[in-house]
Amino acid sequence: MAIQRTISPVDGSVYVEREQASAAAIEAALDRAVAAQRAWREVPVEERARLCSRMVDAFVARRDALVEELTWQMGRPIAAAAGEVGGFEERARTMIALAEEALAPIHLAEKPGFTRYITREPLGVSLVVAPWNYPYMTAVNALVPTIMAGNSVLLKHSAQTPLCAERLQQACDEAGLPAGVFQHLHLSHADTEALIRDPRLDHVAFTGSVAGGAMVERNAAGRFIATGLELGGKDPAYVRADVDLDAAVDGVMDGAFFNSGQSCCAIERLYVDASIHDAFVERAVAWVRQLRLGNPTDPATTLGPLVRPAAADFVRGQVEEAVAAGATAWIDPGDYPLSVPGSAYLAPQLLTGVDHGMRVMTEESFGPVVGVMPVADDEAAIALMNDSAFGLTAAVFTRDLVAGEAIARRLEAGTVFTNRCDYLDPELAWTGVKQSGRGCSLSRLGYETLTRPKSFHLKHA
């Protein structure tokens, strides 16, 4: 039996060991999911909502234990980790509340001699593949609406955060969800790919890397099943000359460095009007220098380690290449004793003198670094913001809300902001363009990707 080990970024220790599911266990889980879904699809939406709400209640009741486990598994400072539970609850309760209207039949205008309407039918069995960086909030994006839509779910969580899958299972079981409606499996990559190819599977919701999304597409090819792919980002922000400078610095820097930059919608590149560029950089550097890099179990820590040493070394490489090519690094890594090559702990960094010939401005970093470029005007900013293989979110900071919205309309991104960033509103559709993915989660529209329309064209006798 294959064993997966979770190495904690906090101290490099083995935090969790789990056996990966055997072929027999996978088969049994699939059969249970198919059988459970046939009954679950007949359960009224109101009853599904009652049970899912009980699941959320059971989940949030464990808040303190969940927060501590989260910190040890992926390194987020414990002072900030509770927000994950709050975010899970907000998203779950929002999608439960939206379900009845989103899943209601569509009745057409009366036509003599006919009854016509459209229903939203569940897809069947869904595989949800969730990542480690926001292990509960990314999972809930698919988990709750998929179940509310009448599907059954198999959850494959990251090997970095296996306890998250188990805690979700406990909450579902305590809530009284019928057996087989929700199951988790600890899977190898090969078994995950085989599961996607299995004819009993009807849908895949994947959150992760572009390479992972390509894997899903390869294995689903020719099966004509629905897939939702929430992939990477290289998200930009533009700071116009008319901003409240301190508020803009605080908003953008938090969007870049929260969770050590390990967010698909973190701000990774920044364009600032040339007239305020130097003043912005001065304030931004001061903001970054206040971050405290340290053991994330210490409540005073504001910047934790990256998920693993290789991830930190990848970002170090991007920064070193940029500096060698002429960029200026404003933060001295020597001020952060824990930040040494081969360690998961990485000093934050702000770079100027960057351009789009550097990897740090074009390739996803997923770490605590941001590059800042001056721009002459809105047109220059828009061109640079759209000069990317990704398109998840983009933000404009300005006092002129009319101009900000006009700029936002021209940005190639699934979500556009003014005067905020790195945030997900569950009543809005979460989607991306280009290599940031395909499909839609959350909002009323999210239910359309988890169901198929069925038309009733009934002629009266």
Image (cartoon, helix red, strand yellow):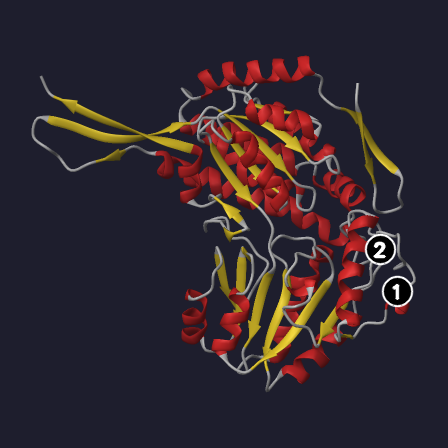
Q: What is the x, y in percent for residue 152?
A: 52, 24
Callout 1: helix, strand or loop? loop
Query: What amino acid is labelled 2 in the image?
Result: Tyr
Picture residue at 86% right of the left edge, 57% below the top: 294
296 shown above or below 57: below
Q: Is residue 230 visible?
A: yes
Task: Name the one closer to the observer, 133 or 383.
Answer: 383
**Residue 41 percent location from the top left of the image:** 43, 22
Mark number displayed over residue 126: none
Residue at horizontal 88%, vertical 52%?
A: 342
Residue 5 shown left or right of residue 112 in the figure: right
Which callout, 2 or 1, points at the residue further toward the start of the chain? Answer: 1
Count the numbered circles shown: 2
Quadrant holding the C terminus? top left
> In this image, 149 relative to 16: left or right?
left
Which residue sits at x=46%, y=72%?
Answer: 404
Q: Kindly indicate whether the residue at mark 1 contacts the one at mark 2 (C-beta within 8 angstroms).
A: yes
Res 346 → quadrant: bottom right
Q: Which residue is mark 2?
A: 345
Can residue 179 be seen in this snapshot? no
Disc 1 residue crowd, few under 14, some 14–19, many 20+, Cα 10 Å: some
Q: Is residue 309 above or below residue 335?
A: above
**Measured from the top left, where is residue 273 in percent x and y?**
57, 81
Residue placed furthest toward the bottom: 275
User: Which residue is the site of mark 1?
Assistant: 336
Where in the figure is residue 414, as x and y percent of width and height? Answer: 48, 55
Q: Amino acid at mark 1?
A: Tyr
* Figure quadrant of the N terminus: top right
Q: Quadrant of residue 331?
A: bottom right
